[in-house]
Amino acid sequence: CKAIAKQACDWDPNWINYGLGIDYETGWATLDGSCNLWFAVYTSNTPRRIEYGTGNLAYAWTFTQAYPRGIDYHPALDRVLMVLTHANGNDIYAMSAPQVTPTKLAVTGLPQLLPNGMVVIPPGWGSLGGHVLITHTDNSIWSADPNGGVAMPFATAPGIVSALEFDGQTLFIAVAATKQIMVLSSSGALTPFVTAPCRPVALASDPGKRLFIACGDANEIWQYTLPSGPFTKVGTPKLESSLYTPVPLVWDGVDSLIFAEETGYWIHMLQL
């Protein structure tokens, strides 16, 4: 339920007024290297992509009995990565375009737990640049190298991690149950950062300037002025109402937040 644009992607509201269908709950989203908008639809085995510049909606792929539980764009690989859960565990796939066969990555050892989000680590973050971090519903955070190898436990949060977001070299995590936003270091240490005004289930950042949070149970979007506040409410859309239901929240790199509403699961923009 994160992401920031890796470059400026000036999205137009005319491209994005889409509903993904009743019961197709959209949990995570990311922008790829061409500014296309990808969604991990966790109640469907078919992720979606909205094309930048046209707004054309495409069904990216239909997985067999496997459901996306996290998504992020990997700049060095120029691929969208997804972690999928299925009856026998979890796997990471790489996708380049809709209807191009995804590549299952040679990552082993992922725990047989329900993933709850994934983020690609930027270069320079300790020795883990280019790896991914995956959160799970037992409060654990695991690291994995997309080029192959065994996934490893990295950190344990004081509650289920509801969102992850890099702002440059700073990794923010949200723990919705306690309203806490924390900083996770490259050594695995967790430090309290700020208490949110509501229970955050999504994070996005305007790099170095603002951290955005979405709270599904309160139907609120707030911005936090970096580095020391304050919080300012910027929207009251109808978001997913469950405490732990993820909400996609994407900063387009210019002036807008992209998010999904609960009613009809419509995708909308909030220009700031």
Image: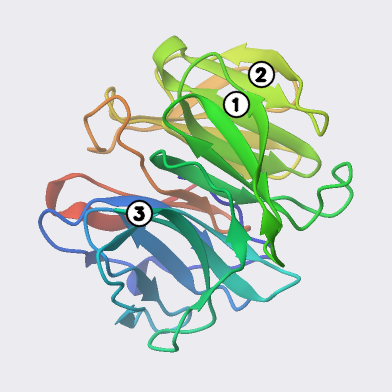
Indicate the position of residue 212 as horizontal and vertical percent values.
54, 35
SS of the residue at dot 2?
Answer: loop
Q: Is residue 2 above or below residue 235?
A: below
Residue at 40% x, 15% y: name it. 177
Q: Is residue 80 above or below residue 116?
A: below
Asked whether 260 or 65 is in front, the reply is 65
Q: Give the residue type at disc 3.
A: Asn
Distance between the Cα atoms at labels 1 and 3? 40 Å
Q: Are marks 1 and 2 in contact (CB under 8 Å)?
A: yes
| Mark closer to the chain start, 1 or 2 | 1
Q: Give the residue type at disc 1.
A: Tyr
Which residue position holds label 3?
Answer: 88
Residue at 65% x, 48% y: name it. 151
Indicate the position of residue 170 as horizontal and vertical percent values.
77, 35
Of badges 2 and 3, nearer the viewer stands 3
SS of the residue at dot 1?
Answer: strand
Which residue position holds label 2?
Answer: 229
Residue at 38% x, 65% y: name it. 13
Which residue position holds label 1?
Answer: 224
Quadrant location of residue 247? top left
Of badges 1 and 3, nearer the viewer stands 3
Q: Quadrant of the N terminus?
A: top left
Distance between the Cα atoms at labels 1 and 2? 5 Å
Distance between the Cα atoms at labels 2 and 3? 44 Å
| Mark closer to the chain start, 1 or 3 | 3
SS of the residue at dot 3?
Answer: loop
